[in-house]
Image (cartoon, grey):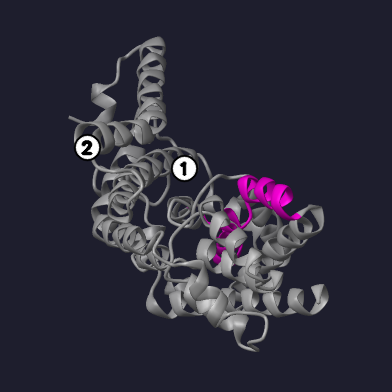
């Protein structure tokens, strides 16, 4: 039975059904952390201050969190883009206005509270709606790279000057990287299924004339299709992130990427990429390294590499990007981050 057949016939009934589903989603997302705290610490009696327990908690919590985000974002974006004309979207954000589109996408990324993995479904929705790939990549980079939590923590810990540098650097990397990749014509290296609109398992050319119930059915089918395609990548990525999370001591960074090492920024970025955390999660490590004397540019480059080029994100992106585009994405973003690190070390010296 399709979604259209299951929904109540009346507008009021459909509204109540959707409100109930949204409420259930919000409740599940809100209590996710509390549930795992109770299960692991109270029921299983695991010690909260050990690295194995932290690894298990990280994996369980983030798997559910990202799965919920995937379901919610894919569904909403699919329903919304069913009302959008691909040609109209391309005309609005493409061509001569691509630079403006990159700035707008990066700005949107700043105000969306996504980590690197949970920004991927929004990326899929934007590409499928016809937004140019370069513009969409600016969003994908900016969303985890610059966020309000990191801004607040940086301001508290290091003052407004460092915070302003962080915002300017993050936006510059996102805009420049997305614009560069867009100019390279990399859209051909996106997996074909991202561009397809399906209803009832069949690819359709246009969403014009669909009923609201059919648009909801499209959203549900898109959730199922994409989750079926990416769930192994999702679990492997989060699993790697959970194993690595919390196991990198500050002393290691201080000894290998200190101010006396000309390759310190390169080493910090190379170490940061395999880690998986959001900006708030990596901030305690950044503060500890700062207290050990690491230059601020090196620290910013490390933090940016952790949140914008995490290995779990690369594993998840591989399902929607071909290897050529994935390699170009990593190379362009990493180059921008390294340049920011050296520039800030020079300016702040």
Q: Is residue 60 visible?
A: yes
- Image position of 152 with respect to 306: above or below: above
Q: Residue at x 65, y 56 (%)?
A: 106
Could you say which is closer to the camera, residue 319 or residue 110? 110
In the rendered image of this protein, does residue 139 appear above or below residue 32?
below
Cα gap from disc 1 to disc 2, whole angstroms: 40 Å
Answer with left or right where residue 192 lies relative to residue 125: left
Image-based side of 141 in relation to 204, left or right: right
Quarter location, residue 303: bottom right
Q: Examine the image and state in which quarter residue 79 appears.
A: top left
Q: Residue at x 40, y 34 (%)?
A: 210
In the image, which residues are magenta? 129-158
Q: Position of residue 129 (x, y in %)?
A: 50, 52
User: Which of the two labelled residues, at mark 1 and mark 2, occupies the earlier sequence position?
Assistant: 2
Q: At which x and y percent is residue 242?
A: 34, 57
- Residue at the disc numbered 1: 77
Which residue is more in the foreground, 10 or 209?
A: 10
Residue positioned 68% across, 75% down in the render: 341
Look at discs 1 and 2 and give the one toward the viewer. 2
Q: Quadrant of residue 22?
A: top left
Q: Main secondary structure of the magenta part?
A: helix
Residue 260 badge: none
Q: In the rendered view of the protein, which quadrant contains the C terminus?
A: bottom right
CA neighbours of label 2 inside 10 A, class few (<14), some (14 to 19), many (20+) = few
Q: Name the residue rendered at 75%, 61% in the picture.
A: 168
Question: Per the image, is 142 magenta?
Answer: yes
Question: For the residue labelled by badge 2, is the local secondary structure a helix, a strand or a loop?
Answer: loop
Residue carrying label 2: 45
**99 horizontally vs 149: left or right:** right
Quadrant in which the N terminus appears: top left
Q: Are marks 1 and 2 in contact (CB under 8 Å)?
A: no
Q: Position of residue 34 (x, y in %)?
A: 36, 31
């Amino acid at each position: 039975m399709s979604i259209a057949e299951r929904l109540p016939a009346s507008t009021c009934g459909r509204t109540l059904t959707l409100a109930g589903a949204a409420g259930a989603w919000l409740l599940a997302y809100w209590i996710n952390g509390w549930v795992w705290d109770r299960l692991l610490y109270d029921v299983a009696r695991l010690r909260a201050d050990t690295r194995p327990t932290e690894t298990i908690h990280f994996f369980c919590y983030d798997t559910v969190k990202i799965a919920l985000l995937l379901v919610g974002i894919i569904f909403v974006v699919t329903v919304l883009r069913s009302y959008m004309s691909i040609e109209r979207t391309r005309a609005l954000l493409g061509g001569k206005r691509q630079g403006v589109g990159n700035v707008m996408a990066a700005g949107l990324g700043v105000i969306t509270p996504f980590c690197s993995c949970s920004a991927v479904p929004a990326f899929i929705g934007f590409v499928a709606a016809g937004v140019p790939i370069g513009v969409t990549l600016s969003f994908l980079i900016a969303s985890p790279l610059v966020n309000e939590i990191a801004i607040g923590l940086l301001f508290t810990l290091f003052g407004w000057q460092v915070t302003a540098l962080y915002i300017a650097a993050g936006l510059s990397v996102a805009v420049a990287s997305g614009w560069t990749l867009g100019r390279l014509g990399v859209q051909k290296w996106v997996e074909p299924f991202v561009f397809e609109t399906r209803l009832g398992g069949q690819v359709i050319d246009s969403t014009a004339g669909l009923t609201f119930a059919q648009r909801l059915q499209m959203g549900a089918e898109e959730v199922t299709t994409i989750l079926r395609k990416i769930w192994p990548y999702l679990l492997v990525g989060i699993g790697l992130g959970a194993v690595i999370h919390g196991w990198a001591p500050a002393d290691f960074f201080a000894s290998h990427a200190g101010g006396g090492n000309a390759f310190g920024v390169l080493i910090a970025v190379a170490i940061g990429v395999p880690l998986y955390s959001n900006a708030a999660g990596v901030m305690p490590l950044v503060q500890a390294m700062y207290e050990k004397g690491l230059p601020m540019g090196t620290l910013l480059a490390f933090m940016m590499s952790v949140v914008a080029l995490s290995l779990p994100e690369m594993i998840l992106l591989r399902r929607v990007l071909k290897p050529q585009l994935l390699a170009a994405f990593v190379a362009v973003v990493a180059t921008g981050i390294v340049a920011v690190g050296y520039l800030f070390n020079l300016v702040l010296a």
